[in-house]
Image (cartoon, rainbow, N blue to C red):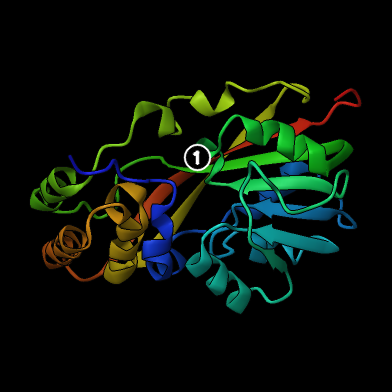
Amino acid sequence: MSPSPDFARSFGRAAEEYERGRSGYPEEALDFAGVPADAVVLDLAAGTGKLTRQLVRRHARVIAVEPTDRMRAILERVVPEAEALAGVAEAIPLPDDSVDAVYVGEAFHWFGEAAVDEVARVLRPGGSLVILFNRSDGEVEPALPRAFDEALEAGSLKKPDDQTIGSGAWQRAFPGPFGPFTTASFSHRVERDRDGLIDLLASQSVVAALPDVRRERLVETLRSLAPEGSYVSPLRLDVYVARLGYDR
């Protein structure tokens, strides 16, 4: 029996595709988080720095923690202003009470429940946890051929429900030491060319975790089925902000 795919660790296999294909975040969503400009902030599971590059323009000091070497190497190259560290959410390589806010973009559903207490450990009392999820908010425009959708569906892996954002399983460990979430959603649209669209799909865990030959074959099939041109993806960014209580 083949081992189960490690979806959470698969992104390093598609780090360059992730950097080319993934979107950033609407600035008004970061305004909503309400973290002051003079704050010391942590971007946890920072990937290639999609969120980090926005944070360094907004905050006095930004630390980026990323477990995957290939992702972190890109982050260090494209966001040299941030302090990049190797580490995981369940063992953050920072002292107690060392940051004013922890941001997590597109990653909290991969964390173990111990991550909530670990985030609380590094936050100063009253500090903010800001969780962001970009989600599809409609079909890609123009529509892709039916054969494209069928090939993607047939070739992709299936994630366990508790590893999906929509299951809500990532919220089980809350509130813990945190107050209730304040939430908001922001619509935005991202335009990509065909290569950017293929890179986006190749960077998703259900494709990135495929064995090498299957992954390469699927990506080339998708590329051959997608007409050249520009594609617009309607997205909804969901933001969750919680404050750390004084009793931990």
Which residue is denoted by mark 1 in the rendering?
A: 110
Q: Is residue 45 above or below residue 216?
A: above
Under circle 1, the secondary element is helix
Using residue 162 as the reference point, say whether residue 240 is left or right of it.
right
Q: Is residue 158 above or below residue 178?
A: below
Residue at image x 16%, y 58%? 214
Using residue 112 as the reference point, say whether residue 117 is left or right of it.
right
Residue at image x 45%, y 60%? 22
In the image, residue 109 lies at what x, y percent?
51, 36
Residue at image x 63%, y 40%? 131
Q: Is residue 44 above or below residue 182?
A: below
Q: Quadrant of the N terminus?
A: top left
Using residue 149 as the reference point, say whether residue 191 is left or right of it.
right
Q: Is residue 127 above or below residue 205?
A: above
Residue at image x 43%, y 52%? 9
In the image, residue 10 lies at what x, y percent?
38, 54
Furthest-left residue in view? Answer: 147
**What's the residue type where badge 1 is placed?**
Trp
